[in-house]
Image (cartoon, rainbow, N blue to C red):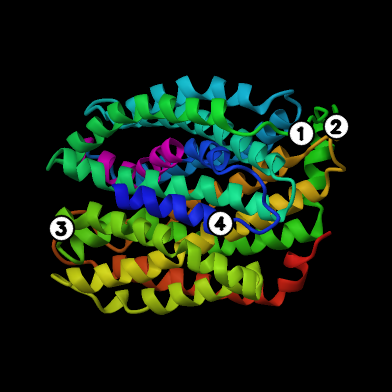
Amino acid sequence: MDFVLFVVREQVFRMNAPAAALPRRQLLAYGALGLPLAMAALPVYVHVPRLYAEVSGMSLSLLGGLLLVARLADAGIDPLLGAWSDRSAKRQRLILLALPLLAVGMVALLHPPVIGAPVWLMGAMLITYFAFSLASVAYQAWGAELGHNSGERTSLTASREGFGLLGVVLAAALPGLLSGNIAQGLSWLSWIFVPLLFLFAALTLLGAPVAAQRLPAGKRLVGDLWRVLGELRFRRLLTVFVVNGIAAALPATLVLFFVADVLHAEAWGGAFLALYFVSGIAFLPLWVSLARRLGRVPAWVVSMGVAVAAFSWAWVLGPGDVWAFAVICLLSGAALGADLTLPAALLADIAESRTAGAGASSQAGSYFGWWNLVAKLNLALAAGLSLPLLDLAGYRPGVVGAVTGLSAVYCLLPLCFKTLAAVLAWRWRKILESSS
């Protein structure tokens, strides 16, 4: 754990461009809240499908449909939450409002009942999603406003995502360490999550730098949202983010199924996830260095190529190929830091390029609202389409055989989407890197 904390700290400050002047303690304080938010995200999107399929016996088609509906509803409110954030005098107040709801929702979500599971799942997801979205959008927009230039905004983004990766590592590893039974491990995780959420939120809210004074956005909520979406540079970045996000969402939804029923290594699931995210932390400075030399978009494209090269041979794996899959997790995880940091830093520049300066009205919340909507649509489509496809292919969790469809959806589809994302990013690199 000390090693991971050291790497997070070092990657944040190696990202500091010469123009960045924020003190290190303030960069770390701002990033701290990223840890519990990421801890909440991983179980919701990775563990919940398998947890409810096994504990409550829900069919994959019903489960996939419920996840799709809940995630579409969740994604649809993100731009509205972003616009609400823009109209709030202090975004920190919205974060404070969201935290208790997030704590309650997570505890409920990770304790599935045997009877009435579909209704319980929907209620718990809606509470969790609303609170998570409100906190995340306000937090991201606040970070964009804290930076005075591209260097500071990149450093703030790196701090947030570095702590987020650490949170994901904890969420991936703790259930297996706490209990040999995944349901019990997730139950314990939910109770550990609650105090960590409030502790790290206090560090951020009390220790982060103070943003420049801004005017709350005007009353034209819908018009402002559409104006943000009408910006060409933002639309191009969002398109690449969509395609690349689908490539990441498909394996994220199915990885535990793949590990259990293709590799026959269910006990290794948490270790694989932890390795993937620790690799993302460790290699983040490499992408920052490449971004300084090549530009952020070319560095992002290089990371996509690394991911394709690493993941392409997962298709040939079978029972017992634990160490081969560990290498895939290591190499594909190495590309993760670029996916998390570089596009978000580009977005922060776009959002703040429309702010005239101190006392100006900021629409950063609207930008991040659309951004989070797209991210969640990717996850919704991954769950809502891939799980029913597996059902149609005859795949059943824990049943020997009929895993060819699982391997195809898990391995091959993401490669197609990742390649397309790289092509689009390279084609539009000049627009994405422009300063206006």
Does label 2 or label 4 sit earlier along the sequence? 4
Whole-number angstrom distance, CA of label 1 to CA of label 4 = 23 Å
Does label 2 or label 1 sit earlier along the sequence? 1
**Extent of the magenta region:** 35-56
State the image coordinates of residue 42 (x, y, percent, origin top left). 38, 45
* Rendered position, 267 above or below 356: below
Does label 1 or label 4 sit earlier along the sequence? 1
Determine the residue positioned at 64% across, 75% down: 294
Q: Which residue is mark 2?
A: 359
Answer few, some or many: residues within 10 Å of disc 2's Cα (few below 14, many 20 plus, some between 14 and 19): few
Which circle marks residue 212 in the picture? 1
Q: Are marks 2 and 4 in contact (CB under 8 Å)?
A: no
Whole-number angstrom distance, CA of label 1 to CA of label 3 = 58 Å
**Hey, what amino acid is under mark 1?**
Ala
Q: Nearer the viewer, residue 382 or 115?
A: 382
Which circle marks residue 43 in the picture? none
State the image coordinates of residue 111 (x, y, percent, origin top left). 27, 28
Q: Is residue 19 magenta?
A: no
**Hey, what amino acid is under mark 4?**
Thr
Q: Which residue is mark 4?
A: 341
Which circle marks residue 399 in the picture? 3
Secondary structure of the residue carrying numbered label 3:
loop
**Hey, what amino acid is under mark 3?**
Val
Q: Are marks 2 and 1 in contact (CB under 8 Å)?
A: yes
Q: Is residue 107 left or right of residue 350?
A: left
